[in-house]
Amino acid sequence: MKKRIMKILALALVIAMAAMMVAACAADDPAPEPITPEVEPAETPAPAEEPTGDAPVLEAPEETTQTSLTVLQASLAVHFRPWGQNDSASADARKQIFDTLITLDYVTFQPVPELSLAASWEVVDPRTTNITLREGVMFHNGEVMTAYDVQFSLMESAQAGGVEILSGMIEEVIVHDDLNLTIITEFDFVPILSHLSHTSLGIVPMAYFLEVGEEGFEEHPIGSGPFMFVDYILGDRIEFVRNENFWGHVPAIETLTFILVPDASVRLMEVSAGNADIASAVNPIDLAGAEADPNVTLMRRQNLSTAYIGFNVERPHISNPLVRQAINYALDTHAIVESVFMGLGQVQDGPMPNLVWGYSPQDPFPTDLDRARDLLIEAGYNPTPGEPGGFSTSIWWNIPNAQREQISEMVQFSLAQLNIEVDIVGMEWAQYLSDTAEGLHDMFILGWVSITGDPDYSLFPLFHSSNFGDAGNRTFWYEPRLDELLDLGRSTVDPAVRLGIYEEAQALIRENAPWVFLHNGEWAFAVSNNLNGFVLNPAGHHSFAPVWFD
């Protein structure tokens, strides 16, 4: 009963906060709010009683029956400095240590002032944003945060390789005084607030960073977040302790530990046995067992991830859009999602998840082998198996991703029916990223998480010609009109016009078929029954600060 009451109170708090924000906007008569697409986000399965993951919990009560929290993860952080590496495991750790200028609401993806380092902001024009910082924010080493720390952090990230898509457009940060600054972008950039929410733009203490250097900071990162870094035992665990001087609501949990357990089934068993509190990324095959397990609560929520099969359009055969369309018609994506993901998530119909503002539903490629054969004949190939006139290609997947291996096998089987011989190539993650960035592949399987909830982050890194290779566009597909649209989308202020731009962009991507749209993901976490306050963030980098135990 207590759990249910607290969840109701949390939801009421969020609704009230949203109402106050709407009222404030109306009073200031700002530019129109973004238009919400007519298509409703797809429903995701949830426990029959007391659904979880519906709304952000802003505060935990001061009392908790357990003061330690153990989270089992599939991987651990690669880099702790915010601009070190844009991967989900590093983001999860950074979320606990660092704060960002802007924090987005988990449901609306709109900024939440109560949870942001920026007490207020003013978007003067598409290139200029004024920020007033929250007073009295203290870093873990006792230093008070100032605008100079923000200036240093943002400019470091803007010049860092690997996260330039997030902050590379920041041209200058002007400090007016300790609490006021202005961010100026190199060009008109409308989604600046969304980008400032990314964990790769976390704020660090400038003096400490300069004192210890990059290597020293990696060994002992310091931020202003709800938890402080204690230790990182490579290949084993990361330990955190509560930040007693946190500027927000101090966590009820005193110690937080991330433990590396690569096997998802083992993670689930450990929580069920009471040896841990949260098991991340439950295997699709274990979902039914987790839901029936009386010792755990299964939390599920649609997320912002997209899985896709990409085509390197610079390679023979698949450089022809007719061939790419034929492969799309040949593959039964519903069967792939059903057999590989077993009901976790849903079939993706375009390049963006439907939770992202600006999503436009696309006509999916139906499974139609006759249509696929006709397209191959039109492209100059013989689709009859065993006869001359077919061709060979390959599909790459990263070891040890069993789901991607299974997808590769299904692609190989399906395309054999069209006289297309597919070689399956698995390789280690680092080499996989390096070789696909260099364009050595034919087809490949990858994913993307639209963390900011904005269509610019969903499409620009993956489809703009300026991002060939390591920056994100591993298909090497270039379409002048699409480049034009994506440039316009990030610089257009009017939400209605911007929406139309992204509708056209998504239709153009679907028509040229640089991808096979596969899967829109869903989080599935198993948690202890007495755990409260944990919310699945569709963007990932989950916060553990609001957690408590009854």
Image (cartoon, grey):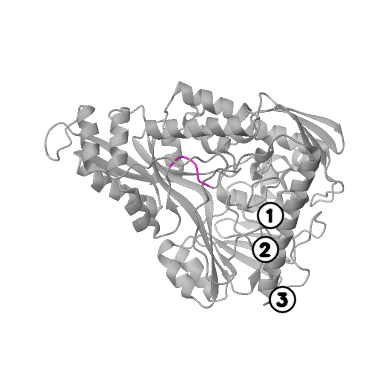
Q: Tell me, yes or no, whether the two marked residues, 2 and 1, touch with CB atoms within 8 Å.
A: yes
- Residue 89 image offset from top left, x and y in percent: 57, 51
Q: Is residue 289 above or below residue 463?
A: below
Q: Secondary structure at mark 1?
A: helix
- Compared across the picture, whether 253 is left or right of 537 comes to right
> What range of the chain is rendered magenta?
350-354
Residue found 77% across the figure and 47% down from its top? 23
Residue 110 placement: quadrant: top right
Image position, residue 339 (x, y; %): 34, 57
Quick one: label 2, few (<14), some, or many (20+) residues within 10 Å?
Answer: many
Which mark identifies residue 256? 2
Within 10 angstroms of label 1, few (less than 14), some, or many (20 or more) residues?
many
Residue 96 is tagged as 1
Q: CA distance from mark 3 to mark 1?
A: 21 Å
Residue type, mark 1 in image: Gln
For mark 3, what is the residue? 65
The N terminus - image quarter: bottom right
Q: Is residue 393 left or right of residue 430?
A: left
Question: On the rendered structure, is 94 left or right of 60?
Answer: left
Q: Is residue 18 magenta?
A: no
Among the two numbered marks 2 and 1 on one chain, the one whose residue lies closer to the N terminus: 1
Choose the circle earlier in sequence order: 3 or 2. Answer: 3
Please tell me which residue lies in front, 490 or 84: 490
